[in-house]
Image (cartoon, grey):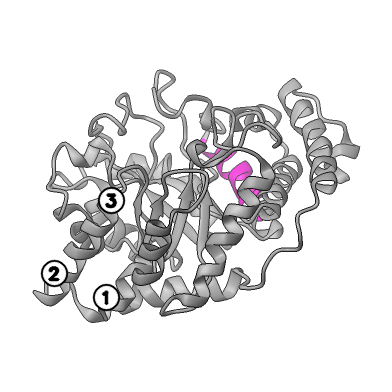
Amino acid sequence: MLEKIGQLLIIGIEGKDLTEKEADFIVRNDIGGVILFSRNIESPQQVFELNQKIQKLSKKTHSHAPFFIGIDQEGGRVARLKEGFTQWPPLSKLGEIGSTSLGFKYAHSMGEELMSVGINLDFAPCVDVLTNPKNPVIGDRSIHSDPEEVAKIASSLVRGYIKSGVIPCAKHFPGHGNTSVDSHEELPKESTDYKTLQDRELVPFKKVFRSRLDMVMTSHILFENIDKDWPVTLSQKFVQDILRQEYRFRGLIISDDLDMKALANHYDDKEIPVRAFQAGVDLLLYCNDFSKPQMALDAMAKALKDDVITAQRVDDSYQRVLDLKKKTLSSEPLPDWNEEAFQQMVAHHQKLADAVKSGSVPADLIQS
């Protein structure tokens, strides 16, 4: 059972190439996937070669399963892919235009670029309803302040990503749009009651779940009137009772970065991954502290040995991970890199992105 724990982690890597130490860690522990950041990116071809190198490691792992290779590529200010890639406007622009056809085309086009360089998972769309205009984290990452508008466009984005072959991950359950504190720096506390969440924040999530969404990300927010003891990522009430039971979500549940200060300032490092898993999270995300994945593996192994978590629970999440990989990911290498073809695709996509930014999108750009 210990050999299954690694599949439940997605981890960051340090640089623009994979080190021998990182490759050994990934193979030895059969890690589930990798998340890329700006520090890992130099050019489209370099990203392609890095991802090909990562995927080749799967043949040496216990499961032989292909890796999730994820990224935060929402558009606007949350976009890790810069030079050489399409520069997409923020989702708020899609909300202003209000076209589901455009939403589908936006995500499908972005997904095509991601797939071309070997990225198969996008931690997008952001389906938070912007109810606090002064929100320091969300802002124009949100599609709209109206839950129904967010639901409508978010659903089209999910369908567009899926059509491109990229796995979308809706975030940040159950909604980060009302906070006034940045969870990267401190734990946001909300007084919102459950009825309000149902009528507002949860409306878009309910819609995207019906759009065959396979992954959702939890938020590090303490909703004091719903679960006064635990923030969402660590809350069985939110993850099991609401997300799994009430909303019947059957896909993968991934945490937001477990290194964020919202959690790190309040809980022991070794407690966090175990508690998140106990709450019902399937995938544990570690982005920036490269010592933490080993710590998490050790903490999870100890919890399993001590019967704090059960073998059945590990197996359930392990199977969800492998089932999604089998359904969506290919173990075949990508075709050889073609710089000219990639640049032509980006040039075409950039016309669409520029039109969205201007607020006026010709029909031929949506249909082409």
Q: In the rendered structure, are the residues bearing label 2 and label 3 in contact, judged by CB atoms less than 8 Å apart?
A: no
Query: Reading the chain from its start, which is encountered first: label 1 or label 2?
Result: 2
Residue that mark 3 sits on: 233
Closest to the observer, 89 or 52: 52
* CA separation in Å, label 1 and label 3: 17 Å
Question: How far apart in space, not on screen, are marks 1 and 2 (Cα)?
Answer: 15 Å
Q: Which residues are magenta?
A: 147-159
> Does residue 298 lie above or below 91 as drawn?
below
**CA gap, disc 2 and disc 3:** 21 Å
Residue 320 image point, x, y percent: 43, 73
Question: Image quadrant of residue 264?
Answer: top left
Which x, y percent locates residue 47?
A: 61, 48
Give the side of residue 347 with respect to residue 323, left or right.
right
Which mark is drawn over residue 302? 2
Which residue is depicted at the point 81% across and 40% down? Answer: 343
Query: Which mark identifies residue 363?
Result: none
In terms of secondary structure, where does tag 3 sit? helix
Task: Measuring from the top left, give residue 319's x and y in whole percent.
Answer: 41, 78
Other-residue count near label 1 (Cα within 10 Å), few / some / many at <14 / 14–19 / ≥20: some
Identified by mark 1, the residue type is Arg
Residue 158 seen in the current view: yes
Q: Earlier in the sequence, mark 2 or mark 3?
A: 3
- In this view, which residue lies farthest toward the right? 364
> Residue 190 in the image: x percent, y percent?
25, 33
- Kind of residue sitting beneath label 3: Thr
Name the residue at 51% across, 46% down: 204
Look at 31% across and 33% down and name the residue there: 184
Vertical side of 121 occupied by 303: above or below: below
Q: Is residue 152 magenta?
A: yes
Under circle 2, the secondary element is: helix
Disc 1 element? helix
Residue beneath disc 1: 313
